[in-house]
Amino acid sequence: MSCCCTPTYKLPNFNLAVDIWRGANPTTNPPDVSTTGQLTPGQLVIQASLPGGGGGFNTVTMFLKLPKLTDIRSTNGGMADVCEVPSGSGRFYNVTFVDDVSKGFATEFRLAILIQQAGWTPPYP
């Protein structure tokens, strides 16, 4: 008998090349880590804010799913990593959160939550 409340995870398809730089390492240098991952909005999360009472802005967080134990770091105690997804695209993101999903199971993977850096355009055909 199985419980209807237990989530079932599938191992993501890591279909994109990903480059990761430690926070203080400029992206003009070679990456500190090169790996593969899956970039997805997961559930689309948009946060609207009005700083100082005027002029709002929107933030969309993206999820980067990576193979388990991938060395990617958030701002926990230091500068956050920067990643480029896909590698070579010029699309850079700041890493804001990292944790493991399905820890201890065959479907374990690492999840990083990303915020787009300023200075690049949306994808076009």
Image (tube, grey):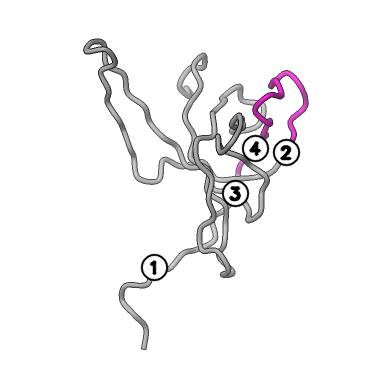
* Location of residue 5 in the rendering, given as x and y in whole percent from the top left corner: 32, 72
Q: Does the stretch in magenta take in 13?
A: no
At mark 2, the secondary structure is strand
Vertical comparison of 50 with 7: above or below:
above
Which span of residues is magenta-colored? 16-32
At mark 4, the secondary structure is strand
What is the distance, in whole Å, between disc 3 and disc 2 at their CAs? Answer: 12 Å
Q: Which residue is mark 3?
A: 66
At mark 3, the secondary structure is strand
68 with respect to 97 (left or right):
right
**Reading the chain from its start, which is encountered first: label 2 or label 1?**
1
**Reading the chain from its start, which is encountered first: label 3 or label 2?**
2
* Location of residue 125 in the rendering, given as x and y in whole percent from the top left corner: 49, 24
What is the distance, in whole Å, between disc 3 and disc 1 at their CAs? Answer: 19 Å
Vertical comparison of 103 with 21: above or below:
below
Q: Which residue is mark 1?
A: 7
**Reading the chain from its start, which is encountered first: label 4 or label 3?**
4
Q: Which residue is mark 2?
A: 33
Q: Which residue is mark 4?
A: 18
Instruction: Judge by depth and name the residue closer to the eye, 120 or 74.
Output: 74
